[in-house]
Image: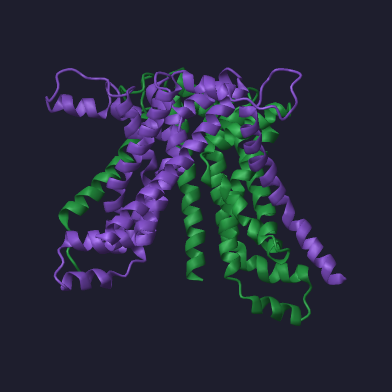
Chain colours: A green, B purple
Amino acid sequence: MGERIPRRFALLVAGVYLFLYIPIIILIVFSFNKGTFPTHWLGYTTAWYKTVLASHEVRDALYNSLIVAFSAVFFSVIFGSLYVFYGASARLNRYGSFFYVTLAVPEIVLAAGFVSALYALHISPGLTTLIVVHTVLGFSYVIPIIRARHQLLDKQLLEASYDLGATRLQTMYHVVLPFLFPSIMAASLLVFIISFDDFILSYFCAGSGMQTLPVYLFALIVAGATPTVNVISTLMIITSACLIGLCAWFEFGRQNR
Amino acid sequence: MWLLVKRELSFFLAVPALVWQLLCVCFPLMLTLYTSLHTTVPGQPWYACTLEYYGSFFTTAYGIIIMHSLLLAGVTTLICLCIGYPVAYFLALYAGRWRTILLFLLTLPFWTNFLTQAYAWFFVLEKEGLINTILMKLHVITEPHTLAYNRFAVLCVMVYCFLPFMIMPIYSVLQKLDWRLLEASEDLGATRWQTFLHITLPLSHVGIRTGLLLVFIPACGEFVIPMVMGGSRYMYIGSAITHYLLNVRNEQMGAVCTVVSCLLLVVCIVFARFFVRLLQYMKQRR
């Protein structure tokens, strides 16, 4: 529509974008602050970045986060894809709505349920339980994304492949997987970010023995804010932004193809 | 025979995800329901049920906590709708070539966790934060006020965090809207407001409904934002669940809180649907 943009509208939208970005920008700016007290601007320094990068606790938390995120991506993408590929031929498709339960209940209910199941079965929470529960969270994103793409797959391609003498495995490898590749990549990145950023599930299911990065961040905030929190937050925001950019790029590539 | 084997094979390849989901989501939720009804008195058979924990839940101050949670979630949802709808409308109708980048910018903060977002608000609301500094410079106030650590701050951050969840579904519906209908409506002499009320709004109700659910459901159980913004001063149902399960390790009460919050959600959603039906019915009769 070639209509002129109403000014009130444009102002409102600009206001909303300011509302969304001002806190984050201030957060990032103050990660370069000299003072220890977080809301006084005393001058520019990168000392806090050095402190954070040298800290063992941060490094341990980061390792835990990475292990959990990579494992969650690995398991949820493998099993999720298998479900999408073979669920159709095994007539399991109608159980697909099971995977939306995770999104339909508040995350805290999921976490509370899982942790009381752990208590009841006398399993002590730790890295393994965290991976298990993050994988479940991953399913609820992986399965809809991959399934949407899988439904677009032209069944004649598969028939052609079989007619030309390819086995099931060969068809899978040369026809189905290349077709699904963009959505698999997008889903993997999404699950990685969600798992990496997740706080509630980690807080409930990690136990007292280990910390992921968000849980460590929470402990820092509760103990009293220092620029260290800003530094870790800034680094996490930048990581997420880069990954989301990559994810959007894969999705965009999919649309263009 | 070979076909059967093939089908069995695909069954076994598909089933791990289902089993995983059942074990980690459905089983724990069932168990929570069971725990909330089960007595801890030894010697009782497993099916012995009691409403004792629900009784002690409702006789204590938890009624107020539930009210506060629902109120907070409801107000957050409404504010998100009032701000989010115009933004979605703008993005769908006027954004033009800026659309992609604006959408991208909208989703970006939504991928950092709420913890970071809530923490970022300290720098706006604190005594020496942005708002106080600006107001001091403009000589509106003479000494700084603490704007953080109250219910207003909690609400502010809630709206901030949940806004993209409202905008996205509404946008995705408005984007597919047939704009010729609006032109036709205006050609037939309707004012902008009439067009909006009778055409745009009813046609986008699916997006609004999705947005309301996407905001209201997580907002009900939210505990990170109140905890960071309000300290432990304000209890919401999410904080109660955390308190019982992690701090006190009282599984029964934790389960009761969880079940109650789920039930409340269901009740709210059913009530909202009923309300919408009622409105539609009244409109038809008129």
Task: Please identify the residue farthest to the left as the structure is shown.
Answer: B139
Q: Is residue B203 left or right of residue A111?
A: left
| Direction from residue A190 to residue B283 in the image, left or right | left
Name the residue rendered at 39%, 33% in the picture. Answer: B70
Residue closer to the observer: B33 or A207: B33
Which residue lies at the image location 31% right of the left edge and 63% below the top edge?
B97
Q: Position of residue B200 (x, y in %)?
A: 28, 62
Horizontal side, residue B221 vs residue B123: left or right? right
Q: Which x, y percent locates residue B167?
A: 36, 51
Q: Depth check: B15 or A11 in front?
A: B15
Q: Nearer the viewer, residue A92 or A199?
A: A92
Which one is nearer the viewer's eye here, B141 or B246? Answer: B246
Residue A28 in sight:
no
* Residue A203 in sight in this render: yes
The residue positioned 70% from the left and 81% from the top of the image is: A160
**Residue B125, horizontal then vertical, whole percent:** 29, 27
Seen as rendered, the residue at the extreme right is: B1
Quadrant position of the N terminus of chain B in the picture: bottom right
Left or right, A202 with respect to B97, comes to right
Q: Position of residue B41 (x, y in %)?
A: 70, 17
Above-or-below relation of B38 to B262: above
Q: Residue at x 14, y 70 (%)?
A: B189
Quadrant showing the C terminus of chain B: bottom left
